[in-house]
Structure formats: C-alpha cells, structure tokens
C-alpha cells in the first residue's frame, strides 16, 4: 500500500512514521519548507520519545519520504490522511480552513481512487465538507476519479504516542462505503495483532467519538479536582477516596488523579468546541460547561495556596518552579497550567526560577526572560522561598530533599501533582501543600499502601 499524510505536526508525523514502520510506503507532506528540509535531515519539529530514531530508520529503509509537494505525494496513494491543524477560531469553534485547503489540493492532483481520511479532530459534519471540496476540485478539472472520504480519529497521548499507535486500545473508522471499509481494514491490519478491535461506524458517529472520548476524560479530571477541593475542606484525603472509588471497575483507576487542571492541545480545545457545536445546534452541554469552569479555577489553586501560606506577602519572594510542559515527556506548552501559575506569581512581584528537562525553549516563547531558567532541578531551588511542583516529570519523584532543604531559603513545597508523601515531607522538615491530601493540620492522618 501507498499512503500520503498531509501535515507533519504531532499527529501527522506519528501517523506517517508508524505506518512506515510496518512496511507501508509513506509520503509526509507539509507546506512548511523549513520543516520538511529539517525532517529530511532527521530533525523533528516536536519532542516525542522514540520518534526521531523511528523517522531516521524508516527514511533510511526508503519507506518514509518527506515532501512539500502535495501534487507529488498524492499520486497513486491508496489513502490520504489529512492531519493539519484545526486551531480554535475566535469563537472557540475549530477553524477548518487548513483542512479544506488540503482537501481542495487533493482533488486538484489525485490520479486514482483513494480514501481521503480526516485525522485532525474536526467537528461533526467535516467529512461531508471535505467530500464536497474534493468533488468540486475534481469537477473543475473535468476529472472522473472515484474517491471516498472517511473519518479516523486519533487517540494518541503525547509522550506515549508511538506505543499508542502501534498497540491501540481500539481504532475507530467512520466510512460510507464498503470499498473504503476494505481499504481501511487492510491498512490497519498490522496494528490489530493484539486482538484489539477496529470499530467501523458511520462518519458523523466517528467524528463525535473523538469529542466524546476527550470530553469524558476531561470530565473525570474536573470531577476529581472538585472532589479533591472538597476533601480539603472536609478533612478527607483524596488519595484514599481515589483508591476507594477506583477499585470499582465501573469507575476505574485511570484518569482520576487530581491536580492543577488539564492542559494540552486536545482537552481544552475539544471541550470548548463541543460546547460550541452543541450551542450552535440549540443544545446546551451543561456538564461540559461545568467541566470547563472547574478546570479554569483549578489552574489557580496552587497559587492561592502559595498566597495563603505567605499571608499575601509575596513581593520579592523567590519561587522555584519544577516543570513547565502541560504534562511529562513532552515539550508541549499549549494550555499548560504552569503559564497561569507563573503569570500570577510574576504579577505579584515574585521572582521565578524554573526548571524543565525539555520544554524551556517552548516556554520562552510565552515567558521570555521574565523567568530565570535553571539548568537542573537543584539549581532552581537555590535561595528559593518555596518550591512549586507543576509537572510530574519522573526525575522529580525522588529528589534528595536534604540537599534541597539546605539550598532553600525556607523549606516549603507546593505540590500540584501529589507526587510526595505528606508525612515524609513533614518529617523532613518541610511545610508541604498538595491537592486534596491530608497534611499535618489534620490530627488523624494515616497512611494506606
Ligand atoms: C489526550 C488524550 O488522552 C488522547 O487520547 C487524545 O488523543 C489527545 O488528548 P494528551 O493531551 O496527550 O492526550 O494528554 P493526557 O495524558 O491525556 O493528559 C491530558 C491532561 O490531563 C494533562 O494536563 C494531565 O496532566 C491531565 N490529567 C490527566 C490529570 O490532571 N489527571 C489525570 O488523572 C490524568
């Protein structure tokens, strides 16, 4: 088989590379010449563990190609994925201009039957627009070429994208013809060896599945954040509550970790877009509106704790911040809670010294030199009045708190991800604040394993 993947962002690049990995001939296309030139040199526009080696290996094997020419890449392709960005427009709805421009381009240049697949997260109804755009472009050049459209949402997690792609929980494909179903089944066959299903459905349902999945996950997080905040007020411990409810298989142990709010390129955008789509069609997504507002508030929770601890006296305080990216194993700063927290610290006159293992160059785009960037986690804590743990990078899990305590000006930790044991921290002489977990001011604190 031969496929084209248009858009070499995060989704497109992982998709194209993983298909090449199983032996399919792939051309990845992007209009950004610099990006394509870099990729040809093995230089990636994003950080994703394992991806660079995989790109280089498949290029060397001659299965993975990069090009700026859609006209060239689309020739004889059995399948073309549209994986370009759908940035939120001013009103929060997904902007489809890039998706539709690619569809037009495909219609202008395709030379044989192919399945055109939307991979970008697009509102319900987009595949129909893509179909229309291609049909018009074909008609304009008087070409009589058959094609199908399909919708194939991705469920990749940043930082674990390759594994998610190669060993998916499920593959969802929306199709409107048997021919397209056959092509897509053949394409995905190498990824179904672990017995996980490929689920075919109609196109609007596939488009909706992506939003419903992300909205459900975002809901779990906001719900747990709400519960964690209430736990604090009521003297309960969210870690215990989490274990208590997670052991019910209907609830499950995953995605019920409270923290400082969800971020990233998907959840905030998709939740907004679904609320918007519903509203446009006369329906109100009441639960999702609450999910969004809880998340906005949650990004301020850590700062509020800092403020309370210091009795509002924050001017001139030196704050060490560990972690900038919206989650570990990525340099993605989109909608990162760290940005909200740091802006708040800066606005009250704090000095911020931040450390992140990979996201500094991305963070600088927003924060510039208003923040000092430390070269390692310990250096960040030197002379600090408090340490804020914002992203739970593995290297923060078991640091030497004796060293840190000696480096810091005052021994105070605000842990936005609940990665430390409250009692151990207190035994080590730290004032320890976290999210919804019992700390020393609760008399009857005890530990479960
Ligand atoms: C998400 C979906 O998981 C993926 O299926 C979809 O395709 C794209 O969006 P991603 O954005 O990479 O993936 O991140 P994910 O690991 O899902 O985390 C999202 C956010 O939720 C992060 O900010 C994370 O810190 C937060 N989170 C996650 C919590 O606060 N608590 C949890 O229990 C889990």
Image: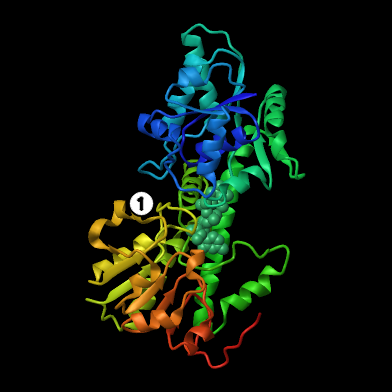
Instruction: Give the residue furthest to the front.
Output: 60
Check disc 1 and report its element: helix, strand or loop: helix
Residue 3 in the image: above or below residue 57 = above
Which quadrant of the structure image shows residue 125? top right
Which residue is pictured at 59% across the width and 45% down the height?
162
Residue 272 in the image: above or below residue 62 = below
Q: Position of residue 381 (x, y in %)?
A: 35, 74
Q: Is residue 444 left or right of residue 279?
A: right
User: Which one is in front, 370 or 297?
Assistant: 370
The residue under label 1 is 362
Q: Position of residue 183 (x, y in %)?
A: 69, 25
User: Which one is in front, 391 or 62?
Assistant: 62
Instruction: Give the residue furthest to the top.
Output: 142
Which residue is pictured at 67% across the width and 75% down the height?
244
Which quadrant of the structure image shows residue 388? bottom left
User: Which one is in front, 281 or 16?
Assistant: 16
- How was this image coloured? rainbow
Quadrant holding the C terminus: bottom right
- Is residue 323 in view? yes
Residue 347 in the image: above or below residue 188 = below
Q: Is residue 294 left or right of residue 91?
A: right
User: Which one is in front, 130 or 36?
Assistant: 36
Which residue is pictured at 51% across the width and 65% down the height?
394
Q: Position of residue 342 (x, y in %)?
A: 32, 65
Which residue is pictured at 38% across the width and 66% down the height?
376
Quadrant holding the N terminus: top right
Instruction: Give the residue furthest to the right.
Output: 195
Q: Mark 1: is the Cβ under 8 angstroms from ligand 1?
A: no
């Amino acid at each position: 088989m031969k496929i084209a993947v248009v858009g070499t962002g995060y989704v497109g690049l992982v998709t194209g590379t993983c298909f090449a990995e199983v032996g399919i001939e792939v051309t990845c296309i992007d209009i950004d010449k610099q990006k394509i030139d870099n990729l040809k040199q093995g230089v990636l526009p994003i950080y994703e563990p394992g991806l660079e080696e995989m790109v280089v290996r498949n290029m060397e094997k001659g299965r993975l190609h990069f090009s700026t020419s859609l006209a060239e890449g689309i020739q004889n392709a059995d399948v073309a994925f549209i994986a370009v960005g759908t940035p939120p427009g001013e009103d929060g709805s997904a902007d489809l201009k890039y998706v539709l421009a690619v569809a037009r381009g495909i219609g202008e240049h395709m030379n044989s039957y192919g399945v055109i697949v939307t991979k970008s997260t697009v509102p319900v109804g987009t595949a129909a627009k893509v179909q229309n755009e291609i049909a018009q472009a074909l008609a304009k050049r008087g070409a009589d070429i058959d094609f199908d459209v399909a919708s194939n949402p991705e469920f990749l997690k940043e930082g674990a994208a390759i594994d998610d792609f190669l060993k998916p929980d499920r593959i969802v494909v929306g199709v409107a013809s048997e021919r397209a179903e056959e092509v897509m089944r053949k394409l995905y066959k190498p990824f179904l060896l672990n017995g996980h299903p490929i689920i075919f459905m109609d196109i609007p349902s596939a488009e909706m599945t992506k939003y419903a999945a992300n909205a459900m996950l975002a809901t779990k997080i906001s719900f747990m954040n709400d519960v964690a905040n209430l736990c604090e007020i009521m003297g309960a411990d969210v870690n215990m509550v989490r274990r208590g409810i997670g052991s019910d298989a209907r609830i499950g142990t995953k995605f019920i970790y409270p923290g400082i709010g969800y971020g990233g390129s998907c959840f905030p955008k998709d939740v907004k877009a679904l609320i918007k789509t519903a509203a446009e069609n006369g329906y109100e997504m009441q639960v999702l509106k609450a999910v969004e507002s809880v998340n906005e508030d949650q990004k301020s929770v850590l700062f509020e704790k800092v403020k309370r601890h210091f009795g509002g006296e924050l001017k001139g305080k030196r704050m060490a911040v560990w972690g900038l990216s919206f989650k570990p194993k990525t340099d993605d700063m989109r909608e990162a809670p760290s940005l909200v927290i740091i802006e708040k610290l800066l606005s009250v006159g704090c000095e911020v010294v931040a450390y992140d293992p990979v996201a500094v160059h991305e963070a600088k785009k927003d924060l510039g030199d208003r923040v000092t960037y430390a070269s390692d986690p310990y250096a960040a804590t030197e002379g600090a009045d408090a340490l804020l743990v914002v992203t739970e990078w593995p290297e923060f899990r078991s640091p030497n708190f004796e060293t840190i305590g000696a480096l810091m000006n005052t021994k105070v930790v605000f842990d936005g991800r609940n990665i430390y044991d409250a009692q151990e921290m207190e035994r080590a002489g730290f004032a320890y604040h976290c999210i919804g977990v019992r700390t020393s001011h609760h008399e009857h604190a005890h530990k479960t394993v």
